[in-house]
Amino acid sequence: MVRTEEELQKEQKPAPFEGKGEILVRSLLNGPDEMYKTGRVFAHTTVYPGSGIGYHVHNKESETYYILSGEGKFNDNGVIKTVKAGDVTFTGAGEGHGIEALGDTPIEMIALILYDKRQ
């Protein structure tokens, strides 16, 4: 399969989890069926300047971010860290996180949510 950029499902929406501003989500794979039911999100996400995804906890799933560009403030279970291009974050099942764009450029990242099948 090849899915061109024009064919991607795209959604510009308010930042989730009581975040601020807006984000753009481009689904690279479209949900659990295309992920062999091992996860629910594989997406290229843009967090615009002044915007941020609010802190939230993942139950029975993990979320990984691979930062493509920009700089952000990442809340890793209450510990604030700066992330930039090339960094990877991992939030395991039962853990929480949030991310906010810093500066005048958006954060571009790949987001992957996988189910915790160990339970």
Image (cartoon, rainbow, N blue to C red):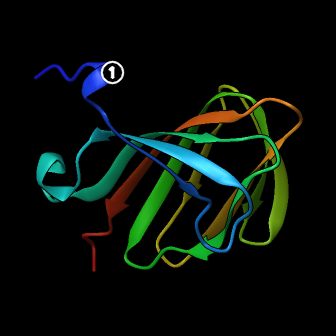
Give the secondary structure at mark 1.
helix
Please tell me how crowded label 1 is: few (under 14), some (14-19), or many (20+) other residues with Cα within 10 Å: few
User: Seen in the image, is 12 located left or right of residue 46?
Assistant: left
Quick one: which residue is furthest to the right in this view?
A: 103
- Residue closest to the eye, 2 or 76: 2
Please give the name of the residue rendered at 44% of the width and 79% of the height, measured from the top-left corner: 59
User: Residue 90's x, y, as percent?
Assistant: 56, 53
Which residue position holds label 1? 5
Q: Tell me if 50 is positioned left or right of 34 in this view.
A: right
Q: Label 1 sits on what residue type? A: Glu
Q: Residue at x 52, y 79 (%)?
A: 94
Relative height, residue 90 to residue 106 (above, below) = below
Quadrant location of the C terminus in the rendered image: bottom left
Q: Residue at x 24, y 27 (%)?
A: 7
Residue at point 84% right, 59% down?
80
**Image quadrant where residue 75 sits:** bottom right
Going by the image, does 72 lie left or right of 60? right
Describe residue 4's horizontal placement relative to residue 93 as left or right.
left
Q: Position of residue 89 (x, y in %)?
A: 61, 48
Q: Is residue 98 above or below residue 28?
A: below
Answer with the quarter of the image where residue 17 lies.
Answer: bottom right
